[in-house]
Amino acid sequence: MLSQQDYRSNIKPIYCPGCGDYGVLAALTKAMADLQLDPDNTVLVSGIGCSSSLPHDLKVYGIHGIHGRLLPIAEGVKFANKKLTVIGAGGDGDGYGIGLSHFIHAIRRNVDITYIVMDNEIYGLTTGQASPTSLMGHKTKTSPYGVIEKPINPIALALAAGATYVARGFSGDPNHLAMLIENGIKHKGFALIDVQSPCVSFNELNTYDWFRKRVYKLEEAGHDPSNLEKAFEKAFEFDRDNNKFPIGLFYKKESSTYEELDLAEQKGALVDEPFPSAEEVKNLLDSENA
Ligand SMILES: Cc1ncc(C[n+]2csc(CCOP(=O)(O)OP(=O)(O)O)c2C)c(N)n1
Ligand SMILES: [Mg+2]
């Protein structure tokens, strides 16, 4: 039996004291231990940002990728060896800004990966610029008079793109978050877990107290996660000044994955294919030139 601690590396996390990302680390290791994931067959892929340093903290395979590109890397890992459990982890700037189009395309392919977005409504690593989820009016280093753009609504966007598992957690409630991550990993298909994860150093607006006053759990409010229309309704409870901010599972649906439909993948995992001989490679190149 592996304990939660067995999934931790010896590296000290880079997060500031009190950072919400500690809650995500705790929730993720709890989910991994509950599922007894095999560290040799688990891969964590990240982008760039404070949140994206997560692979260093864990004793599973990890790729610290490039800004906004964690999803194509994670998809590539899954396509090469679909027997692996593949988890992506990054920030709101990474996933909903520079990486936004990958977000939509990975969702519509329904690749069987779990994507955790540590959404702190700010660029943390670069010390406090407005992110795509910063609220209107929020004064940041790049918006000294307050943000004048409307924030991205990741839950509604994921639902519109056809996501088959859409959840939102809060790093101030790691046990609830662990349950969402665990079910996301078990889900066959793309699972989004947007995590409200306060940045205690550079976001003085969206604090733990601010969230605690607003969050409520969908499962306690009788929400039916098989109902897409209701999921959209809940996704648009987005004006966070109305004191309502749902967390939990918005929507879940069974659907075929990219790997199931792809003809090459149907033959088995690519990683199990024999490596082509020099002669086979030569024949292939010759046939291309013909
Ligand atoms: C192509 C590219 N553009 C910009 C940067 C600079 N940069 C590094 S992290 C970051 C934003 C990180 O914000 P987020 O993804 O929300 O992560 P957080 O640090 O808040 O966890 C930016 C703009 C970069 N590394 N690469
Ligand atoms: Mg951020």
Image (tube, rainbow, N blue to C red):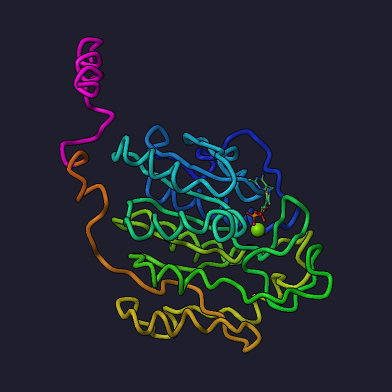
Q: Is residue 106 above or below residue 144?
A: above
Residue at 49% x, 52% y is 30
* Residue 165, above or below 9: below
Quadrant assignment for the C terminus: top left
- 130 and 240: which one is in front? 130
Which quadrant of the structure image shows residue 143? bottom right
Residue 68 part of the magenta segment:
no
Query: Quick check: 249 left or right of 204?
Result: left
Q: Is residue 286 magenta?
A: yes
Lateral position of residue 244 relative to residue 72, left or right:
right
**Image coords of residue 200 (percent x, y):** 75, 61
Instruction: Tell me if 279 is positioned left or right of 42 in this view.
Output: left
From the image, which quarter does the N terminus lie in?
Answer: top left
Closer to the camera, 143 or 166? 143
**Place of residue 266 in the rendered image (x, y in percent of width and height, measured from the top left):** 17, 42
Question: Which residue is at the front of the view, 94 or 178?
Answer: 94
Vertical comparison of 148 with 7: above or below: below
The quarter of the displayed image where residue 135 is located: bottom right
The magenta stretch is 266-290
Picture residue at 67% right of the left edge, 49% below the top: 50
Q: Nearer the viewer, residue 215 or 115?
A: 115
Q: How many marks?
A: 0
Toward the front, the furthest residue is 290
Q: Position of residue 136 (x, y in %)?
A: 70, 78
- Residue that protrudes farthest toward the right in the picture: 144
Q: Residue at x 47, y 34 (%)?
A: 61
Q: Quadrant of ligand 2?
A: bottom right
Name the main secondary structure of what is drawn in magenta: helix
The location of residue 233, given as percent across then percent down, is 43, 85
